[in-house]
Image (cartoon, grey):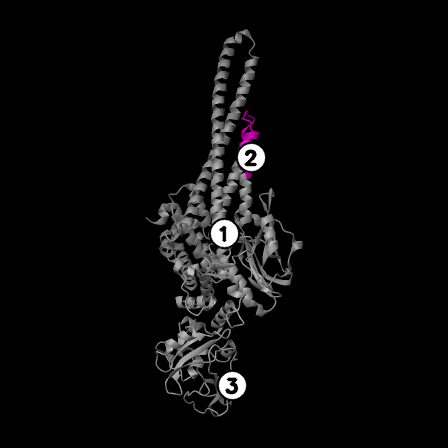
Amino acid sequence: MALWNQTVKLPGEVMMTIKQHYNEVMPIEIRHFLAPWIEERILPTMNMQMDYDPHQYEQLASNFLSDFILELETRAPEFGGTNVTVQLCFTEMAKKLRQRFQHDPIQLFSHLTRCFQMEWSYVNGCAMPYQNAEIVEVNEKLHTLTTMVASNEEENRQLKLDYERFSLEYHDLIKLTTFVKTLTDPQQTQQLEQTKVQVSEQQKRLNDFLNAIQNRQLTLIGKIKEVIDQLQQAHDLIMVKQLRLWKANQGLAGNGAPLNNNLDTIQQWCETLADNLWNTKTQIQILSKTRQTINVPIDPNLPDLLEPSKKEIINLLVKLVTASFVIEKQPPQVMKTNTRFTSTVRLLVGPKLNIQMNSPSVRVSIVSESQAQHVQQSNQYSEALASGEILNNSGTLEYQQATNQVSVSFRNMQLKKIKRAEKKGTESVMDEKFALLFQSKFQIGSGELVITAWALSLPVVVIVHGNQEPQSWATITWDNAFADPTRIPFQVPDKVPWPRLADALNMKFKAATGRTLSEGNLQFLCEKAFRHGTPNTLNQNEMYISWAQFCKEPLPDRTYTFWEWFYAVMKLTREHLRNPWQDGLIIGFIHKKQAEDMLMKCPIGTFLLRFSDSELGGVTIAWVGEGSDQQPQIFMLQPFLAKDFAIRSLPDHIADLQQLVTLYPDISKEKAFGKYFTAFPSQANNGYVVRRLVTQVPGVPMGSYPNTPSHSMSIQSPDHTRDTPSISSSYTGSTLMQL
């Protein structure tokens, strides 16, 4: 059966929730009239959308938007004679879709997908197959809560009506009792007796009625307490588990992990939770007010039963608002002074509680690690204690209708000054962590509740020069990868199992270069990090690497650390070797001895590319050639650095060197690198002689080039403490054509 046919059979309060979510982007009537068409396009993608890469998903959303607008415009005339209102709705919706989602079709597609997930969840009592058990649990909890709160609201309404009915009948009884006192004439004895019987019967009936009302009221108070317990559980599921997980994923995203940005879904949960909290708070107020305003004899103990529930609801509301104040876009974690940066904060319950109506301002300051700890522990902060000065650090939370978000984006912040703490031991400014603190105050209702909220950013390292970046990123990478979500800012373990660090390095390298590290690559890094050239016999899960080994202690016979070496290789690959690396043409992470052993089994001219052990950010070419004794010999070309590739690319260097014939194991260099070779013009058009740079290896036969001049210009990489005797390359200017 079609999903919509089952959805419309759901209870009224559930349909209202579904309608509310649809109405954020389109009238639910369109969902009704176009049900088969929409389901054909949304349902098949729901199980697959997790597998789409961003480009595919954007294309899918864009196609859907175009088709949706076309379908609305095509179908609109069908309703001209029967339902003009629907026709106008279709026509207006097509216009709004163009205006609102033309530049962001993903927003529409994602929102409708979430609405379908909600329908599926309510219809089947579970979520779509790809959703994990925790998401199913949240949806079921909120569904149960909404139903319970709606039931309590109806019971509260009936109780109020019964109280009013009792009050009227009670006052009638008072009048009747007063009338009895007026029957003093002996001739009215019979009427007096009849009236007394009537009064007695009415008193008994009203006493029974009152007892029944009060019992029902006690039952309702018990149900409200049960709802409060369920609200607390839902709060823990959403704000403690799901939102905390989202924040942890933000840290991992800082290391390059893809962020499953389900913040819109979490906002929907928060809004539903806020709805139920506010409705329950209102029910308590109505119940309390009813008993105070209606002049009937009531058990004096009942108010004491309501007051604790009211306090619990307010406390939960405060917790929800403060926890839903989040940093949607984190500031840069390595922050350079006097450099513009951006950040965005968002209040997830803002649209539901209309908090933006009071135009709450948000201020940003930078705090030290100790100040961040003080804020977290005391929930208090004074701007006088700021650790620096930030320009353009205030903004106003506003409602963004297109996204249904209450947020503020800081687009031009700049850190002008920073106050640093005293350093201990070997600490440096690149080890010192700060955070940006976002603060605001929110008024709930008619100003009856004022809530102070704050949010701390991920750790930030402040630098003043680009050469401080590598060590700063070591601090941030370690923190993002290994911080416990419940930690005291910004504590991290001093050592971690190697597999966890390997995952973090793999994540960073893939994000920077577009390709993951292989098991062999990670084994090489393990051996390098632990300072041994051959595999360790220990189980890697039992091998712990310390912070000092990672980025403080130099590698053997080197002046740099493991992280500095890895960071330089990653930077070189990202900026100059990205395409060959993604194509799998660079082995890179391989020991010199292993490269020699592999090449000695190959024909003359076979070569491979490995990252240099001796030079930061260097890549060398190893190949099989003929030695002076006509026997195979392994040659290692002096490493190329970034400055070399700024003059000539790696594929062009390889094209120049005729000693290089076959990329290991058996791919011709033209097939491997040909698509990256630079095509040179055969003739100049400006009156000058055409020239180009070529790479050659002095002293090693390389074949001949036409018109090669006898002089050359040598531009060599520095030869500093190389790990192997190497051959220098040089660039030679060659005249190709004379005009």
Residue type pointed to by label 2:
Glu
Q: Residue at x 51, y 42 (%)?
A: 277
Residue 272 seen in this snapshot: no
Q: Earlier in the sequence, mark 1 or mark 3?
A: 1
Location of residue 192 with respect to 606 vertically, above or below: above
Report which residue position mark 1 lands on: 244
Q: Residue at x 37, y 85 (%)?
A: 631
Report which residue position mark 3 lands on: 714
Q: Tell me, for residue 591, which label it has, or none.
A: none
Q: Earlier in the sequence, mark 2 or mark 1?
A: 1
Residue 614 seen in this snapshot: yes
Residue 104: x and y in percent read: 47, 60
Query: Residues under labels 2 and 1: Cα distance?
Result: 31 Å
Task: Find the magenta span and give its range.
Answer: 291-311
Residue type pointed to by label 1:
Arg
Contact (Cβ within 8 Å) of mark 2 with mark 1: no
Report which residue position mark 2 lands on: 307
Residue 140: x and y in percent read: 42, 45
Contact (Cβ within 8 Å) of mark 1 with mark 3: no
Residue 616: x and y in percent read: 51, 73
Q: Nearer the viewer, mark 2 or mark 3?
A: 3
Question: Foreground residue, 659 or 738?
Answer: 659
Residue type pointed to by label 3:
Ser
Secondary structure at badge 3 equals: loop
Query: Residues under labels 1 and 3: Cα distance?
Result: 57 Å
Question: Foreground residue, 612 or 37?
Answer: 612
